[in-house]
Image (spheres, rainbow, N blue to C red):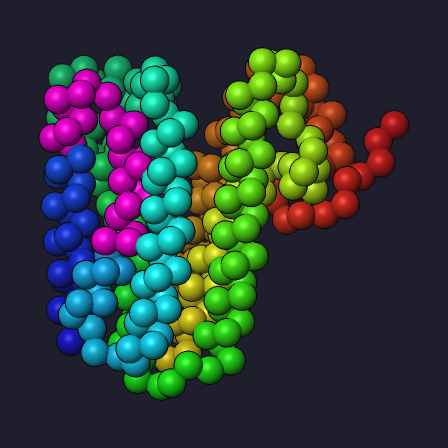
Amino acid sequence: MFGWNLLITALTVAVMMAAALGIAQRRGRHDGIDVLWGLGFPVIALVTLAVSDGNIDRRLLITALTVIWGVRLAVHIGRRNHGKPEDPRYQEIVGRKPGSTWHVVKSIYLPQALVMWFVSLPVQAAQYSDGSLGALDLIGALLWVVGFGFEAIGDHQLQQFRDDPSSKGKVLDTGLWRYTRHPNYFGDATLWWGLYLIAAQSWLGAAMILSPIVMTWFLAKGTGKPLLEKSLHSSRPGYADYVARTSGFFPLPPKKTV
């Protein structure tokens, strides 16, 4: 049954990506894929909820947590991008081979589809666990709360900073940003480890450990933190000092610098 679930969710992701590509071609911009990144996971969780046969309490728990996270992220990204120019990353990709739909698909939509489906595996596997809720479910839910708090509060603090005209050219080093240069990324990784622990109540869910590892790697070493910091080093004069005293990922007390 789980095998059929994987096939159904893979097809679901493919349909979502095809729809997003069609909308993007009409709009002439591709940053809508970032909103779909948030919405896609709730859709996968809800589709799995409809076809799975595990413990209903766990199914509802992990689906609710995934939907809350994904919808908040999608709304945040949508508001952040509204009225702004196309993301430079997508402009660069499209500019490499103008007019080539396949180039756009393989460079933007296919990678995100594969990562979305793979990272969501614990959410899918958890819904096939028959055992009643236990300690791992509680620990996972609490870890999710911590991660969600870091991500949501970090995003809110950053948005307030960006909306303040006096912040132009400055570096955000207060609130959660005093303890980590990327509280939102740290929170994102943490909540996915929480979802994994909920899934790990069964051997099938525990076997999906590569999913949170991949998510954490992308945030800390892949397309998240490194690309952002590269641009900030050149655009914010005080960013080098901020890097010297502030943890790159895990929240830690600031270092004393001379």
**Residue at the limit of the structure toward the right, as seen here:** 258
Q: Which residues are magenta?
A: 21-43
- Is 18 within the magenta? no
The structure residue drawn at horizontal position 31% and vertical position 42%, both measured from the top left corner, is 37
Residue in the picture at 32% in, 63% down: 63
Residue 103 percent across, percent down from the top left: 19, 27
Q: Main secondary structure of the magenta part?
A: helix
Corner quadrant of residue 100: top left
Relative side of 219 to 174, left or right:
left
Quarter in which the C terminus is drawn: top right
Q: Is residue 232 above or below residue 78?
A: above
Give above or below for 244 relative to 121. Answer: above
Asked whether, in this view, residue 174 is left or right of residue 223, the answer is right
Question: Which quadrant of the figure contains the N terminus?
Answer: bottom left
Is residue 121 visible in the rendered image? The answer is no
Q: Which residue sits at x=69%, y=24%?
A: 240
Where residue 72 sits, quadrant-wise, is: top left
Q: Is residue 242 visible?
A: yes
Magenta stretch: residue 36 in it?
yes
**Where does the image place residue 170, in percent across and percent down from the top left?**
65, 18
Q: Residue at x 21, y 78 (%)?
A: 53
Image coords of residue 244 (percent x, y): 74, 32
Percent across and percent down for residue 187 are 53, 49
Dividing the picture into quarters, in which one does residue 83 lie? Answer: top left
Q: Is residue 40 left or right of residue 227?
A: left
